């Protein structure tokens, strides 16, 4: 039951970034366990028509690996996935990747001060440190609608798109109108004979300033890397400025709301439809979506927006609260992910038999989103309260990879076998974080979202600017940790 020095779980952006940084720092004894048959995480899973990133690509890429070849400002999914594959090749990560290895249990051995890692195929590995880079958005969430399983036609989730199902000329129902749906609804609207879009809560939508990056510009970016860095910096600050309303006071969101209202008014002339598309909560409470083609799709003759609650699904129809039966041939669920489960339904047993599910019963929390008391040498990337609503999450991933390296160096320097964050440090950090969050738009904005757990607490998002997080994760402070020898 021997194993590598370090195990990374997940080969999405976080896992790959960590692996690259480990290698650069001279740690070569690690493997990446990936449940699927390929790398890419969310950019491997989500292949729905129209899938693209809603953060500009020059910023939604590693700072240390600029890509002058993005075809658009907001690149489509195949290009992002391709970029990740190129990173794997360029940084020699392939020998570290183990596909088809779904981690089902992590158990800390108090005597050996090592983790035992169990995978679904029955393998058990021992390792000194585990870096969980599983992300939060990978377990599809299906709504609990009576009769759902009786539907006779194809029915699938946006993250598990059934490409064998041709929707051309069919009658299609889309349930959910979130970040994914606004991207694929315009594509399906062009194919389907009839499309019913079932909306539970309207979304605030901004124009998407997308454009093709012309070959001449790409040549300049390739020949003159400082130009690429300048572009990235400009985008960074433009998006960071958007965080003012999130981080300072919801009142500052008013200008953003005005922009969204004007976008809606411009694209939807019908006042009745416009009213049904106008949210009643403060903008930013849910993720602000970017789309230029979603509203126009809803105004097409073959598309109907249904805002009455769904009460039942039968063999051939979706039934709404007015009793209306919407006969359809296929259903697409754009209903998001089970975020709380992704964090909490893991078998992770730390020091003295402490179960992570018990430790997080009141809500998932970690110090800087990375370490949790009682679970030595277990590091989370994109862990609790480190998601973002305003800019590229890769900024957080890079800061966290840097911080984890700091912890590993602390171990190397001191000769300690493991480090465990002090419970008081973690508590004080999270108390301050939650106090900050209660005044923010996600809790005070009058909406429900996947950002909030069942207690109404935001366990998902970082409430500040990304430069603040980067400053706080610059150095692993020895005083924050108990060193275990
Ligand atoms: P989502 O934003 O959580 O949207 C889910 C949609 O399904 C919402 O409209 C929700 O309505 C609806 N819904 C959920 N349960 C329902 C039920 N029982 N009955 C009726 N409607 C129901 O999910 P997503 O669109 O898959 O996006 C999830 C996250 O992925 C995003 O927030 C974003 O972080 C990420 N994402 C990013 C990009 C990108 O370009 N970077 C693209 C796609 C996704 P309510 O609003 O009423 O809950």
Image (cartoon, rainbow, N blue to C red):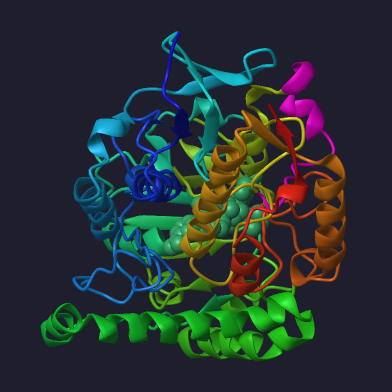
Q: Position of residue 310 (x, y in %)?
A: 63, 46
Residue in the picture at 77% in, 49% down: 479
Can residue 271 be seen in the rendering of this structure? no
- Residue 355 within the segment the image draws in magenta: yes
Q: Position of residue 10 (x, y in %)?
A: 43, 37
Residue in the picture at 35% in, 58% down: 51
Q: Position of residue 286 (x, y in %)?
A: 65, 65
Task: Say left or right for 342 vs 397.
Answer: right
Q: Is residue 226 above or below residue 30?
A: below
In front: 329, or 259?
Answer: 259
Q: Quadrant of ligand 1?
A: bottom right
Q: Is residue 164 above or below residue 388?
A: above
Q: Position of residue 206 (x, y in %)?
A: 52, 80
Residue in the picture at 70% in, 88% down: 254
In front: 33, or 341?
Answer: 33
Task: Say left or right for 353 vs 465.
Answer: right
Image-quadrant location for residue 33? top left
* Viewport quadrant of the C terminus: top right
Residue in the picture at 55% in, 47% down: 404
- Residue 168 within the segment the image draws in magenta: no
Q: Is residue 309 above or below residue 350?
A: below
Can residue 105 be seen in the rendering of this structure? yes
Task: Say left or right for 155 vs 130.
Answer: left
In front: 284, or 114?
Answer: 114
In front: 455, or 99?
Answer: 99
Q: Residue furthest front?
A: 414
Q: Of helix, strand and loop, which mostly describes the magenta segment?
A: loop
Q: Is residue 256 above or below residue 152?
A: below
* Viewport quadrant of the N terminus: top left
User: Which region is colored magenta?
Assistant: 351-369
């Amino acid at each position: 039951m021997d194993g590598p020095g370090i195990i990374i779980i997940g080969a999405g952006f976080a896992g790959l970034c960590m692996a690259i940084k480990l290698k650069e720092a001279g740690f070569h004894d690690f493997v990446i366990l990936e449940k699927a048959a390929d790398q890419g995480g969310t950019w491997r899973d989500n292949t729905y028509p129209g899938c693209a990133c809603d953060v500009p690509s020059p910023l939604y890429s590693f700072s240390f690996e600029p890509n002058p070849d993005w075809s658009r400002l907001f690149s489509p999914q195949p290009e992002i996935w391709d970029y990740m594959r190129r990173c794997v090749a360029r940084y020699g990560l392939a020998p570290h990747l183990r596909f088809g290895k779904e981690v089902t249990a992590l158990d800390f051995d108090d005597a050996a001060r090592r983790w035992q890692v169990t995978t679904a195929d029955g393998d058990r590995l021992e390792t000194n440190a585990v870096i969980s880079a599983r992300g939060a958005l990978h377990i599809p969430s299906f709504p609990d609608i009576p009769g759902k399983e009786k539907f006779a036609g194809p029915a699938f989730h946006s993250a598990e798109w059934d490409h064998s199902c041709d929707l051309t000329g069919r009658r299609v129902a889309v349930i959910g109108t979130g970040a994914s749906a606004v991207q694929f609804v315009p594509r399906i609207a062009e194919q389907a004979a009839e499309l019913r879009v079932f909306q539970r809560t309207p979304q605030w939508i901004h124009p998407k300033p997308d454009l093709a990056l012309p070959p001449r510009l790409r040549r300049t970016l390739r020949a003159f890397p400082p130009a690429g860095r300048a572009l990235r910096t400009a985008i960074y600050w433009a998006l960071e400025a958007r965080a003012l309303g999130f981080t300072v006071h919801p009142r500052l969101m008013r200008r953003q709301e005005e922009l969204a209202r004007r976008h809606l008014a411009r694209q939807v002339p019908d006042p009745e439809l416009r009213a049904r598309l106008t949210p009643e909560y403060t903008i930013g409470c849910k993720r602000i979506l970017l789309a230029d083609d979603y509203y126009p799709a809803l105004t097409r003759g073959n598309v109907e927006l249904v805002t009455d609650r769904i009460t039942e699904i039968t063999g051939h129809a979706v039934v709404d609260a007015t009793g209306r039966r919407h006969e359809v041939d296929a259903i697409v669920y754009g209903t998001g992910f089970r975020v709380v489960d992704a964090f909490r339904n893991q078998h992770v047993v730390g020091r003295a038999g402490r179960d992570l599910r018990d430790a997080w019963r009141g809500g998932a929390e970690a110090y800087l989103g990375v370490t949790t008391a009682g679970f030595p040498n277990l590091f989370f990337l994109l862990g609790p309260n480190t998601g973002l609503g305003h800019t590229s999450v890769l900024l957080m991933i890079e800061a966290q990879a840097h911080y984890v390296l700091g912890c590993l160096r602390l171990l190397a320097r001191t000769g300690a076998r493991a480090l465990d964050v002090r419970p008081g440090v973690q508590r004080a950090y999270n108390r301050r974080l939650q106090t900050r969050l209660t005044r923010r738009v996600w809790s005070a904005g009058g909406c429900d979202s996947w950002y909030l757990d069942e207690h109404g607490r935001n366990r998902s998002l970082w409430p500040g600017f990304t430069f603040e997080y980067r400053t706080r994760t610059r150095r692993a402070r020895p005083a924050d940790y108990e060193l275990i020898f």
